Amino acid sequence: MELKLEEVWDFHTDLRLLVMLPTRRQRDKLAEQLDLPTARRLGGVFSATGRLTETARHEQWQQLEVELDAITGMPGMTLVRSAGDLTGVGRQLLHAEGVYFVNSEADLDDLGRMWEVGWRSIAPMYNEDNALGGGARGDAARGLTPLGRKFCERAWDRGFMIDAAHANHRTQLDLVEMGRTLERAVHYSHGHLDAPARRLYRQRGMPRATVEKFVATGGVIGLTPYPAFVGRWERHMEEIGFLAREAPRNAALGSDFTGLIARPLMFREFRGAGELGKFADTLADAHGEAFARDYCGRALRRALEAELPPK
């Protein structure tokens, strides 16, 4: 099959690091996964901001402003605020990967600030626990807190997409049950299924028994070709095969390109965005062209068209 780069939507990148890492050598290494000329030719990417987990609230916002300047200052890239912005190439949807500056109900007003600045997707927590719920490497018994429930309800009312990728298993289930009750989609932007290859990631993956529950909310599940998550390329392809059978219209690429800085970096079978065409061919041979196109961008594009404000 012929996959055009303009068809590709990637559910998770850390594109800011291409301009923010301190040395040219570090930036060039990440560019092997996804460089800016290629990013400008893709349909779009989710572009994540980071988090400071144990820092004063105002200092967290100061850092976010630096990252926002880096993301919005990339030439040839356009920030997506509504479904009307999806047409074209080089689109970026701003994603908050962990919110550690909301610690009280008064702080929920920051959601309005985030929306006005341009965020459209939120992961309530990163790997560490916070006031909203349990992170993948935190307390496994900690679920979504009362404040976390108010946060998600208000975020959905505002129009944000909610991402459970870094939540522990209990918080994932709490988010899914809340989503089903409120008829809102809960997504899993990037990661793997079941237990990680490296134990330090603990509950970073999604249990297969949970997949059906995510899909029932309308959520999209992104998988990441990362050796530290799955160990072997064959396992990554088997997980894609599972979603091809169980959730064919809800599976997506969540590459984590330009965020994969721990070794080993990439599989030789898929070192970066330059090999998207070959990867799509592999998917089409195994699961059909329709699935390959959905996985490489069409499923995520459908979700964006359904959830973003029209203009």
Image: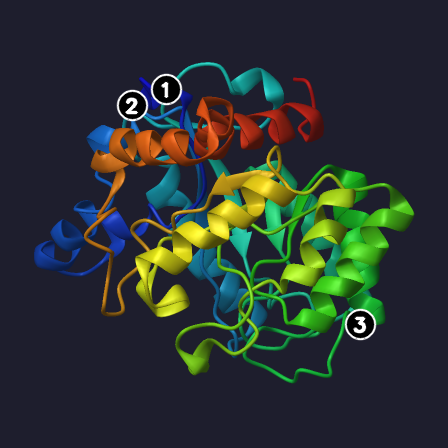
Which residue is labeled 1 in the image? 6
Q: Quadrant of the C terminus?
A: top right
Residue type, label 1: Glu
Q: Going from the N terminus, do you reach mark 2 or mark 3 first?
A: 2
Q: Quadrant of the N terminus?
A: top left
Query: Of tags 1 and 3, which is closer to the observer?
Result: 1
Q: On screen, 249 above or below 205?
A: above
Q: On screen, 286 above or below 298?
A: below
Residue type, label 3: Thr
Which residue is labeled 2 in the image? 41
- Left/right placement of residue 30 relative to residue 1 reads left
Image quadrant in which you'd find residue 150: bottom right
Q: Nearer the viewer, residue 189 or 162?
A: 189
Query: Tag 1, which secondary structure?
Result: helix
Q: Which mark is residue 205?
A: none
- Left/right placement of residue 39 relative to residue 129 reads left
- Left/right placement of residue 265 relative to residue 185 reads left
Q: Residue at x 64, y 23 (%)?
A: 305
Q: CA distance from mark 2 to mark 3?
A: 41 Å
Q: Nearer the viewer, residue 191 or 51?
A: 191
Which residue is labeled 3 in the image? 145
Q: Are marks 1 and 2 in contact (CB under 8 Å)?
A: yes
Q: Going from the N terminus, do you reach mark 1 or mark 3 first?
A: 1
Q: CA distance from mark 1 to mark 3?
A: 40 Å
Question: Disc count in the image?
Answer: 3
